[in-house]
Amino acid sequence: MESFTLPSPMNKVVFILGATGSGKSKLAVYLAKRFYGEVINSDKMQVYTGLDIITNKVTEAECDGVTHHLLGGVHPDMDFTAMDFRREANSAVESILRRGKLPIIAGGSNSYIEELADGVGGKFRSQYDCCFMWVDVELTTLHQFVAVRVDKMVEQGAVQEARQVFKADHNYSRGIWRSIGVVEMDSYFRAENSGADEEMKARMLEAAIDEIKANTYNLTLRQLQKIQRFCKMGWEVHRIEATEFFLRKGHVGDKEALWEKVVGEPSVELTRSFLNT
Ligand code: ATP
């Protein structure tokens, strides 16, 4: 792997924005490995401990030795607010910079990003030089992909994961229990517990999975609207057009090369010029 010798980043921070499923976490690790970085998670459900499949946390293998901050660790019943995120992310940024490394903030919760960057009078953006990257995927393409991803999560054990934490008196309005993939399963688990027949259960499970897909779809729409709002607010957001990668079918190795070409390399170029200015 090509790696770069760069001056210590001092006060530079990279943000990776994008809708669910666009590949932000992969890009964050990719850049961290090339620019001596550490990743700060800005997905509001991935900050909690638990539900690793449902919230789609990066696995240890995917982290590939790169240190991640705010990935798990918060008690699942707690409400970790945007202000909590601002405080914790600020201290992670300070610690990463103090060690001469590059902070890379990646995740889909744009209210967290906005609170960090512009909260309390926009102190962060005057204190640090910020580079915002947006991994953008054309909507219809992203939506097809999101549905496939939900099916993959189910294959990986998302239903079992939700079943393990199911409680008849669950409060779905707090902490990690607000995650898409939890409340949608509620009726199905109730049916299981009340001895519904196999056909009924199969129908309910299918309906629950369809609802998860619909809710994830709506989440991506809201996320894109928020990123577009950042652009209108005057933030300089560098858009990386990743659609070509998502459209391409084929061999894993070919796809990897295409990802490098359409997402990896342009992001490396952007980061390199950001760090050199
Ligand atoms: P909002 O202000 O609407 O909460 P936001 O930008 O702060 O927006 P989002 O990341 O868009 O936060 O999350 C909104 C909702 O989407 C969450 O409350 C949760 O229900 C769901 N959600 C977000 N991320 C995930 C995830 N990784 N896994 C499951 N559900 C998620």
Image (tube, helix red, strand yellow):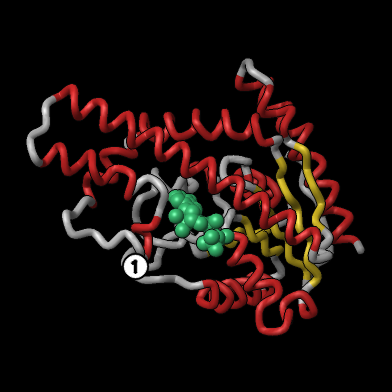
Q: Is residue 41 visible?
A: no
Whether residue 273 is situated above or below residue 260 in the rendered picture? below
Residue at which label 1 appears: 75
Q: Amino acid at mark 1?
A: His
User: Which image quarter holds the C terminus?
Assistant: bottom right
Query: Which one is in front, 231 or 249?
Result: 231
**Residue situated in front as seen by the camera: 99 or 129:** 129
> What residue is shown at x 68% (from left), y 24% (from top)?
247
Q: Would residue 3 be found to the left or right of residue 16 on screen?
A: right
**Residue depicted at x 11% and y 41%:** 193
In-front residue for pair 102/45: 45
- Residue 233, percent from left and from top: 79, 65
* Looking at the image, residue 34 lies above or below residue 256: below
Image location (x, y in percent) of residue 72: 42, 60
Name the side, left or right, on which 17 lies relative to 181. right
* Residue drawn at point x = 26 percent, y = 39 percent: 160
Q: Is residue 276 left or right of residue 220?
A: right
